[in-house]
Amino acid sequence: MQISRPFRLPLRPGAVCVGFLLAGLVAGGTAHAASFGFEDVAERAQALAREPYRPKASTLPAELKALTYDQYRDIRFKPERALWRREKLPFEVMFFHLGKFQTEPVLINEVTPQGVKHLTFDRNDFDYGKNKLAPQAWGDVGYAGFRVHYPLNNDKYKDEVVVFLGASYFRALGAQQRYGLSARGLAIDTVGGKGEEFPRFSEFWIERPGANAKSLVIHALLESPRATGAYRFEVKPGTETVTEVRSKLFLRAGVATLGVAPLTSMFMFGENQPHRTDFRPEVHDSDGLMVATGEGEWIWRPLQNPKRTLTTSFAMKSLRGFGLLQRDRNFANYEDTEARYELRPSAWISPVGEWGPGRVELVQLSTPDETNDNIVAYWVPEKPPAPGQPLELAYQMRWQGSQPQRPPGAWVVQSRLGRGFDELAPNEHQYVVDFAGPAIDKLPADAPVKAVVSADANGEIVERNAFRNEATGAWRMTLRVKQIKATQPVELRGFLQHGNDILSETWSNVIPPQ
């Protein structure tokens, strides 16, 4: 199983048009039509869930299907024709053309005080470059998706801040960030079923912003063979761009795994899995999964590029938050002047309200290069809804840069794997883990800090140490562990303790089968 990079996935059929009349205007920074809202989309999603899924036949012109990758890239939206540019509103919207990988259209509507306006495809919005095409014969073929622009980094230029393109994928940026990991509306049977199902956003409604708007509201209708859903996104650009998400889901049929608020990223190699021939020390969009449980524990799991699919999870009574983070922000640890991995955002998800018991599941796939997303993380409710019964969940997503979400005490700043001077015994592994944070930064070098480390039944802890790293001021935990059966994984846990006080988050690592 391999996950394609987002925005290159073929879209699933099933676009549905919903029309609404709007009236009224709510005063403030953003213009809202009083008669249209989230519940209108939710009613449509519920109605669709009662009906069998009916995939739509493709109407994409043959010449667009036949485009090569380079030919498709040569089709560009004309920035001067962006939605709301003439009105000089703070937000602008530009659209993606259909073709090559993007073969199924989405319907896009503008919500204004006067009503809902379907945004018809206009060939004059695009520069077709060297392509010899006949767009005048296509009619309203629709769009593949859209991107939103806003003066994120300075007042003179509107940067790209959020993109919706491909299945239910979307991604956003905070100030001074570069695109990296992505989010999805929903994940179905990523593991545990007969194959992953990719729901798609089939229709969008974008609310026209006011003249002084600081946020943009986007509604979306989600569809797949076994699910429908309504989504409301409020995008708030800034140093860390915040996306407020409200969702209401309906299942047409049962699923093995319902993945809520899924995140998708890439990890090829890093400090815990160095590459022998690549000149770059690390290549990844994210370097770890962080989980905060309702019971107060903070967990850090370093990511891996395993030889075979590796699925692990963290069960809990309630969730405080989870996310895929890019903690390492040092350019020297990547040395990639084009990809700039040190500028890739982290994404932290916080539930709004109580989600109840469930688990955070992490799926790690093998990838031969950096063009494939091989990391997926999501929340799985302990009891998924019965078909036809609504599941309404809200959450906040923070697209963070150099100041990501951190535990209150201390956190892992690096996690290295490998031998030192001494040889390791067969099936023995050595880890070097550094922690930093306010709970330990001011401790004296001779403080009686100890490493509390444990392994499951397939692991034997051979050695553990904790000491101050005088070169950096961080506290270092070292351990050696024997993998008793090389064909089975080993679950490891470790944290720093001073007296009765737990100082750090829990470093939770897995040794995969060899």
Image (tube, rainbow, N blue to C red):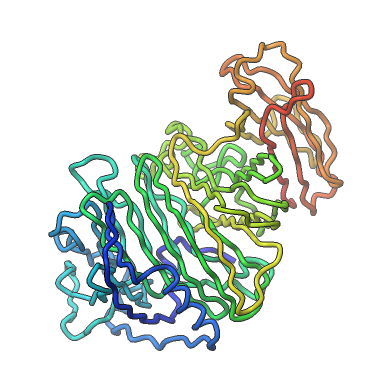
Which residue is at the front of the view, 384 or 120?
Answer: 384
Q: Residue 453: horizontal and vertical position, in percent? A: 78, 33
Q: How many numbered markers are drawn?
A: 0
Q: Residue 429: horizontal and vertical position, in percent? A: 74, 37
Tell me if residue 284 comes above or below residue 1 in the rendering: above
Q: Residue 266: horizontal and vertical position, in percent? A: 51, 52
In the picture, measured across the screen, residue 128 lies left or right of residue 433, that is left
Examine the rendering and report whether any part of residue 446 can be seen.
yes
In the picture, measured across the screen, residue 349 lies left or right of residue 507, that is left
Residue 255: name its quadrant. bottom right
Residue at the image position 23 percent from the left and 76 percent from the top: 121
User: On the rendered image, what quadrant is the N terminus found in?
Assistant: bottom right
Examine the rendering and report whether any part of residue 10 can be seen.
no
Residue at the image position 60 percent from the left and 79 percent from the top: 388
Which residue is at the front of the view, 69 or 442?
Answer: 442
Q: Residue 202: horizontal and vertical position, in percent? A: 41, 75
In the picture, measured across the screen, residue 165 lies left or right of residue 267, that is left
In the picture, measured across the screen, residue 506 lies left or right of residue 378, that is right
Which residue is at the front of the view, 427 or 322?
Answer: 322
Residue at the image position 75 percent from the left and 21 percent from the top: 498
Tell me if residue 42 comes above or below residue 300 in the rendering: below
Residue at the image position 66 percent from the left and 30 percent from the top: 433
Which residue is at the front of the view, 508 or 116?
Answer: 116
